[in-house]
Image (cartoon, grey):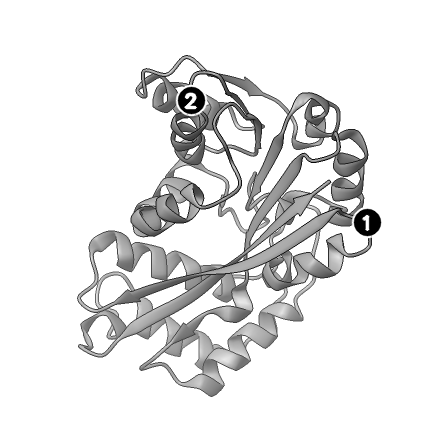
């Protein structure tokens, strides 16, 4: 699923990079989620199966995880990754995200990791899922929040200007605008419905100098999301400032001893 300027944030390469940069933290955090031995789990928008392969170990042989994604390359990678676990408690299928509304009926847990940004009506999607799930089942939502990104060594006013310009850009059916990464907005969506219980937590990721090549590429691609918004009102001087700072060949940000990046992802656990 590509946006209008050709970047594919659901691609295998991007999702693998995203996981590599945060892997140790995220696996610990997933182990603390309400996913239990014997659970039946539906992983919606599973990508290349990075989280699914770990969840298959958490739920054990008495559980089952079914992974769906619209992208054929992701499905192939998910099958390979889950096969490598030697577990047999999984299945993978190429399917549209909206198919989860019917599929969810038999599952204890529905995983929506960085998925709501790709659904045209997130509130209705969550409502329809909830209506079809049994009492006591859980929906676990994780999503980025572009407004939470912070860099030291970067001019705060210029970063604020960049984010605000991205927020003002026009959205179309193919583009991922800054505000499409829901993050902190998820509670305002699900509070329209009655859940037996809901919990929220913030996952904070901190990257600091010296940066690995994966770190640099992740930071570069993250800034690119903001820089290349369609119809953005960002001025040329601000674009040049960020291109100079984060260019992969000679960006000055990566060389500063005190440089770091902070990014938050927001998790909501909804119990039916």
Please tell me which residue is depicted at 63% across the width and 56% down the height of the picture: 180
202 left or right of 219 in image: right
Q: Which quadrant would the N terminus be assigned to in this image? A: top right
Q: Position of residue 68 (x, y in %)?
A: 56, 25
Q: Which quadrant would the C terminus be assigned to in this image? A: top right
Query: For residue 54, what is the image quadrant?
Result: top left
Closer to the chain start, of discs 2 and 1, is: 2
Query: For residue 51, what is the image quadrant?
Result: top left
Please tell me which residue is depicted at 36% across the width and 43% down the height of the picture: 27
Q: Position of residue 3 (x, y in %)?
A: 57, 47
Query: For residue 101, what is the image quadrant?
Result: top right
Give the residue number, with chain letter if any, for mark 2: 60
Give the residue number, with chain letter if any, for mark 1: 194
How far apart in space, not on screen, are marks 2 and 1 (Cα)? 31 Å
Does any portion of residue 174 appear in the rendered image?
no
Does any portion of residue 100 appear in the rendered image?
yes
Front residue of 239 and 217: 217
Q: Position of residue 241 (x, y in %)?
A: 38, 78
Outermost residue to the top = 88
């Amino acid at each position: 699923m590509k946006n209008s300027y050709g970047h594919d944030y659901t691609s295998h390469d991007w999702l693998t990079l995203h996981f590599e940069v945060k892997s140790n933290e995220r696996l610990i955090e997933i182990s603390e989620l309400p996913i239990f031995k014997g659970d039946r789990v539906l992983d919606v928008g599973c990508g290349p199966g990075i989280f699914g392969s770990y969840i298959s170990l958490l739920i054990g042989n008495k559980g089952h995880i079914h992974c769906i994604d619209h992208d054929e390359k992701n499905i192939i990678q998910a099958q390979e990754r889950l096969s490598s676990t030697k577990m047999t408690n999984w299945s993978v299928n190429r399917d549209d995200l909206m198919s989860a509304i019917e599929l969810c009926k038999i599952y204890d847990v529905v995983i929506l990791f960085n998925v709501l940004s790709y659904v045209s009506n997130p509130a209705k999607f969550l409502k329809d899922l909830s209506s079809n799930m049994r009492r006591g089942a859980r929906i676990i939502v994780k999503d980025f929040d572009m407004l939470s990104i912070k860099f030291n060594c970067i001019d705060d006013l210029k970063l604020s200007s960049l984010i605000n310009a991205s927020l003002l850009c026009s959205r179309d059916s193919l583009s991922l605008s800054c505000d499409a990464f829901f993050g902190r907005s998820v509670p305002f969506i699900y509070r329209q419905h009655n859940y037996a219980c809901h919990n929220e937590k913030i996952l904070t990721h901190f990257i600091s100098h010296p940066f690995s090549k994966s770190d640099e590429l992740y930071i570069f691609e993250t800034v690119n999301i903001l820089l290349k918004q369609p119809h953005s009102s960002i001025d040329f001087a601000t674009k040049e400032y960020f291109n100079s700072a984060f260019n992969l060949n000679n960006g000055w940000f990566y060389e500063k001893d005190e440089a770091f990046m902070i990014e938050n992802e927001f998790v909501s656990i909804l119990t039916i």
